[in-house]
Image: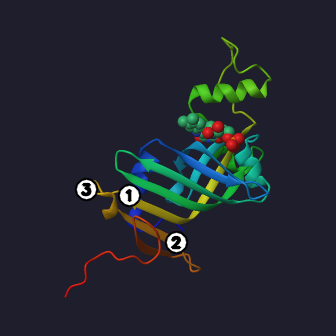
Amino acid sequence: MSCPSEIHSLLQEIFVDGSAYGQFATVDPNHLPSVRTVHFIAGPNLASIVINTHIQSEKWANIASGQSHVSGCYWSQEKRIQFRFSAKAELIQPKQVEMQPHRLSLWNNMRAEVRTAYILADHNIPLYRANPNVDPVPHSPSHGLIVCRPYCWDIFYEDPKEYRFGKRHIYTLDTNQSWQKKDVSSLHEKDILLYDSKS
Ligand SMILES: Cc1cc2nc3c(=O)[nH]c(=O)nc-3n(C[C@H](O)[C@H](O)[C@H](O)COP(=O)(O)O)c2cc1C
């Protein structure tokens, strides 16, 4: 299953060609939510959104505890479009040998300064040391991947003229794994009067 075909090129522009730093929400075993900023990276065919993370982070622990439903949100200021997704998340553990090439390629795409932080922590070297002499190339055993497979994409097109003209398209995967689209207003998902009736 991929993403909805109608928004494939839009998602490609944002999550493949751009740098999408957005908000990612998880819940803990007591159903308490946490949200934080992450870098959303498109997976193959845009069927997934992947996040690089440290395996000691709370988001990792939340998903590992069995709370695998997650949610993401990204606002493109340039396009004036809000992207939201709901997904099932899977953890790619450092020890998963078959996923090693994929993990390594995402590791190498991380900024060197982020990789440096992982490696310092791995070696118990203070993160705030002024001039740590570490090589950010070796793959950190603390680097994990969160693979999110969206079952809902919610795209809100803000209207440049006026907020009330905004359009929201919600795409949901049905039980046959087909995407169903619902158009809703800028305010909520319920029925709402949009046009004057023709008399
Ligand atoms: C601009 C920006 C981008 C970030 N990108 C990531 C990321 O891709 N992955 C990640 O694990 N944390 C990222 N972080 C850090 C998280 O927001 C968060 O502080 C950290 O992962 C710990 O979160 P947690 O313990 O709640 O899971 C980023 C922070 C900022 C400010």
The answer to whether 184 appears left or right of 30 in the picture is left
**Above/below status of 112 relative to 31:** above
Mark 2 and ligand 1: say if the CB distance to the nearest ligand atom is below 8 Å: no
Point 46% across, 56% down: residue? 83
Residue 83 visible in the snapshot = yes
Question: Dot 3, crowdedness within 10 Å: few (<14), some or many (≥20)?
Answer: few
Q: Which residue is mark 3?
A: 161
* Dot 2 amino acid type: Thr
Q: Tell me residue 80's x, y (percent).
A: 36, 51
Task: Looking at the image, tell me whether mark 1 or mark 3 is earlier in sequence order.
Answer: 1
Task: Looking at the image, tell me whether mark 3 or mark 2 is earlier in sequence order.
Answer: 3
Point 56% across, 30% down: residue? 111
Q: Which residue is mark 1?
A: 9
Q: Tell me residue 17's x, y (percent).
A: 41, 45
* Dot 3 amino acid type: Lys
Q: Which residue is mark 2?
A: 172
SS at badge 3: loop
